[in-house]
Amino acid sequence: MTQNRGVVEGYVKVAPVVVRDVEKATIDAAGIYYKHLNEAIREVVADGAKHVVLENVNGQRYLGTGVQAKGVKIDVHGTAGNDLAMFMDGPSVEIFGAAQDGVGNTMNAGTVTIHGDAGDVLGYGMRGGAVYVKGDVGYRVGIHMKAYENLVPVMVCGGNARDFFGEYMAGGILVLLGMNTQFADQPLVGSFVGAGMHGGTIYLRGTVESWQCGKEVGITEATEDDMATLKPVLAKYCEALGMDLDEVLAVPFTKLAPFSHRPYGKMYAPM
């Protein structure tokens, strides 16, 4: 879009209205360009705000990106744009609506809770923290998730997922429940589940066909030991989104794990 008369990409070039008390800041995002909105978020956090409330969010990108502040909570009312919580290290972000693509991109620490649906490529390269989605998610969710030192990233999605769920996954825990979906007549998950997977664990509430999964993936029923690991993860998810843990656990889970840590080793080096 042509930039003139104080407008950039459809947003008015004005500073957002910020209402402050001692530790809480409320920011009206209506009509605010995403760069100005993110500047305002960083400023109030730097000034000591522990609770930041964003009103009237309408697709602004990079919310919470790069924020390094444990103990800070950011509430997002509306639809969050791409790359929410990218590189985030510490805060808790709660979206009272839906989120677009790239949530938790290369995220280090913190929690993202989404009360609606989310888009594609969630948790790309995610190294720590947790992402909880109540509804459906798109394509390539959990791609390149990895554990880093003592960090184990967790992502739980409450609805259905499209193709390439857990693609190239290298670490962490990725869970799909198939409960809060708009597409009950479609499969729990698409094709190429765990394609190229060489670390971490995928848990599916229900079953999956072998043809849906990458050749690198072993498919088994979740054991008692597996459930001992999974139950605390699901308990935190249910607490965050107001769901019934017993209902979630009423259906057996399937576990997907890689056969090899070097699924394509023979392609690049002699064995």
Image: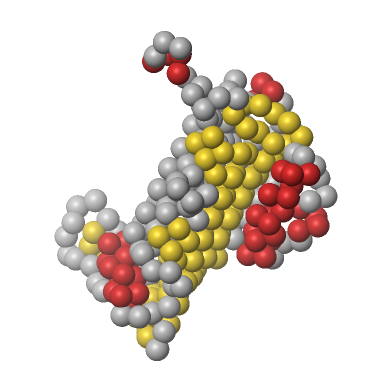
Q: Is residue 205 left or right of residue 115?
A: right
Q: Report the residue that reaches farthest toward the top.
A: 270
User: Is residue 204 visible in this depiction of the protein?
Assistant: yes
Q: Is residue 169 left or right of residue 6?
A: right
* Residue 12 found in image quarter: bottom left
Vertical relation: 117 (above or below) 168: below
Q: Give the x, y percent position of residue 143.
A: 48, 38
Closer to us: 19 or 146: 146
Tell me what residue is drawn at x 24 percent, y 72 percent: 14
Closer to us: 26 or 227: 227
Q: Give the x, y percent position of residue 35.
A: 27, 62
Tell me what residue is drawn at x 49 percent, y 51 percent: 150
Vertical relation: 248 (above or below) 75: above
Closer to us: 139 or 90: 90
Q: Give the x, y percent position of residue 214.
A: 59, 24
Vertical relation: 135 (above or below) 28: above
Tell me what residue is drawn at x 42 percent, y 52 percent: 107
Q: How is the image coloured?
A: secondary structure
Q: Give the x, y percent position of residue 64.
A: 39, 62
Tell me what residue is drawn at x 53 percent, y 30 percent: 197
User: Is residue 205 visible in this depiction of the protein?
Assistant: no
Q: Is residue 68 left or right of residue 114?
A: left
Q: Report the residue that reaches farthest toward the right.
A: 250
